[in-house]
Image (cartoon, rainbow, N blue to C red):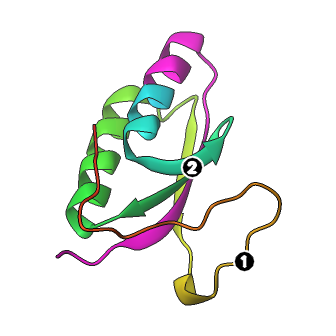
Amino acid sequence: MAKRQLYLAAYDISCNRRLRKALYVLRGYASGGQKSVFECFLTVVEKEQLLEEIAQVINPEEDRFVMVRLAGVKHIRTLGKAVLPQDGSFFYVG
């Protein structure tokens, strides 16, 4: 099974149409999130696909997108209703 890494993806998009498209793309890869910030538990291939898809949506002159790999995945702490990411026998992207 492919190794997954936990990433934090966030965007700031000025156009409502592009915003909805970016939201649709990110929700396809996210394991959690809120508003414009998402937790994505991705393989290398999924990360590349996500970056390609989001590049087709954003306007680099007006919009911002950032994706950061979170270090220390073994030591994730959650508060409130947060759920730890799971790396089960399969992971649905779609």
Q: In which quarter of the image is residue 88?
A: bottom left
82 left or right of 66 in image: right
Image check: 71 left or right of 24? right
Looking at this view, name the residue that lies furthest to the top. Answer: 17
Q: In which quarter of the image is residue 12?
A: top right
Residue 43, located in which quarter of the rendered image?
A: bottom left
**Above-or-below relation of 93 to 17:** below
Image height of 70 relative to 12, above or below: below
Q: Is residue 42 left or right of residue 75?
A: left
First to last magenta residue range: 1-21
Measure how far apart labels 1 and 2 are at the Cα level: 14 Å
Residue 61 colored in magenta in the image: no
Q: Which residue is drawn at 29% across and 56% down?
A: 91
Which SS class for mark 1?
Answer: loop
| Residue 18 in the image, given as x and y percentages of width and height | 49, 19
Kindly identify the amino acid type of the residue bearing the numbered disc 1. Answer: Arg
Label ID, residue 32: 2
Three-letter residue code for mark 2: Gly
Label 2 element class: strand
* Circle 2 residues within 10 Å: few <14, some 14–19, many ≥20: some
Label 1 vs 2, first from the N-terminus: 2
Quarter of the picture containing the C terminus is: top left
Residue pushed farthest left? Answer: 1
**Residue at the right extreme, as displayed:** 80
Disc marking residue 65:
none
Closer to us: 37 or 28: 28
Residue 18 lies in the magenta stretch: yes
- Horizontal and vertical percent for residue 79? 81, 65
Determine which residue is flagged by label 1: 77
